[in-house]
Amino acid sequence: MITSTPEIPKTGMREPVLLTRQRGAAVLALSVIMLFLITIVTFYANKGAVLEQKISTNQLQYLQAYEAAQGGMDYALAWLATSGSVAWTNDTSYPPYNQRSTPAPLTQMIGNYTSTVTLWRNSSRTNIVEIDSVSAGDATATVRQAVNLSLFTGNTSAPLTVNGCISGVLGSGSITGGASGVGVVDSAAAGCIALGTLTPPPGAGVVAGAFAGTAWDNTFGISKTAMYALASNQAGGATGGPIYYYTDATVTNPWHASLPAGVSTPPLQTDQRVILIFDTTTCPKINGGVTIYGTVYCSAGGDLSGTGGGNIYGSFIVDGPITKYTGNGNLNPDPYANITTLYTGSPISKITGSWRDF
């Protein structure tokens, strides 16, 4: 009997191969998708890293600019507290202020940044000043701070101011009236003022009973202690100028020094005027043909003889009665000798809540 072997279906041999190919295609597709997703994730991760790096760089540059601006602010505060002299010009572009410093008083390099400081004030309140410090470089930053400068606010318009009677005037001295037409301002009554040969020319009047209290308070508006502290903070000390503050221990009598030193004609810059203070028992004799541009203050009156050839362009202030005045000294006005424009350095107090960085 003939038997036959059953035929194995051909499909049974092809099925494993087909499944393997299908699985390979699925893995390939999945790998491509995964690779695509990984590429996208990597791209955005790198993009985020670049963005974070830019943000970090910008933040660093801003911090550097901010530190430079703050450094300019700190320097301006120190500058004003020692020997800062400021010229002002009218400018209404930044209300409520209507005056700004001109030119900008402080420009300096701090690292890679240029820091520029501008001062602003309102002419109705000259003691309040806003300091604006702007730094520029890889980034920019601004800081602002308002301060109280406690400016000298007294009246220095008359060539001669006296706290007391005037008598015993001899010699060939002269007084020329100031811009207001006033030659002499005195706290005493008119009947107590005998100017003799110092009588001002027509148009240069005498104002009697002009103030109460001391001539110091009428003129400066700050205490002697504050003024001495201010003078002591100058680079050259209490007698280093532009404030020259002398006591009995440091004064030279007679006084033979012209001020500012080396200036023989009226200076044009307001910061060249001086404040010469003799806080002494007696007022030294100002003679020897000296010329002084600014304000001269004597804490004592009495015998002021011997003013040989001295010339004061500004104000001569005597805080006491004059019993004798001889010589040929000349007292002349100086329209630039007003102390508020002469010297703005002072003990500074920051105004709370005024700081900002915008």
Image: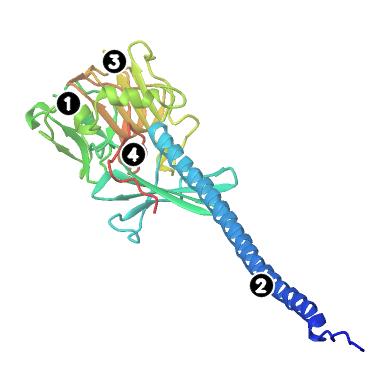
Q: Nearer the viewer, residue 284 or 11?
A: 11
Tell me where residue 320 appears, x and y as whole percent: 18, 21
> Who comes first in sequence, dot 3 or dot 1?
1
Under mark 4, the amino acid is: Ala
Q: Nearest to the eye among marks 2 and 4: give it.
A: 2
Vertical placement of residue 347 versus 181, above or below: above
- Tell me if label 1 and label 2 are in contact, CB under 8 Å: no
- Tell me if label 2 and label 3 are in contact, CB under 8 Å: no
Can residue 67 be seen by looking at this rendering? yes
Dot 2, how many residues are within 10 Å of its Cα: few (below 14), some (14-19), or many (20+)? Answer: few
| Left or right side of 162 for 97 | right
Tell me where residue 270 appears, x and y as whole percent: 40, 42
Under mark 1, the amino acid is: Thr
> Who comes first in sequence, dot 1 or dot 4?
1
Tell me where residue 287 appears, x and y as whole percent: 37, 21
> Who comes first in sequence, dot 1 or dot 2?
2
Residue 181 placement: quadrant:
top left
Q: Quadrant of the C terminus?
A: bottom left
Quickly name the residue at label 3: 280
Between marks 4 and 3, how big is the CA–CA gap?
23 Å
Q: Quadrant of the N terminus?
A: bottom right
> Who comes first in sequence, dot 2 or dot 4?
2
Between marks 2 and 4, how big is the CA–CA gap?
85 Å
Quickly name the residue at label 4: 337
Quickly name the residue at label 1: 214
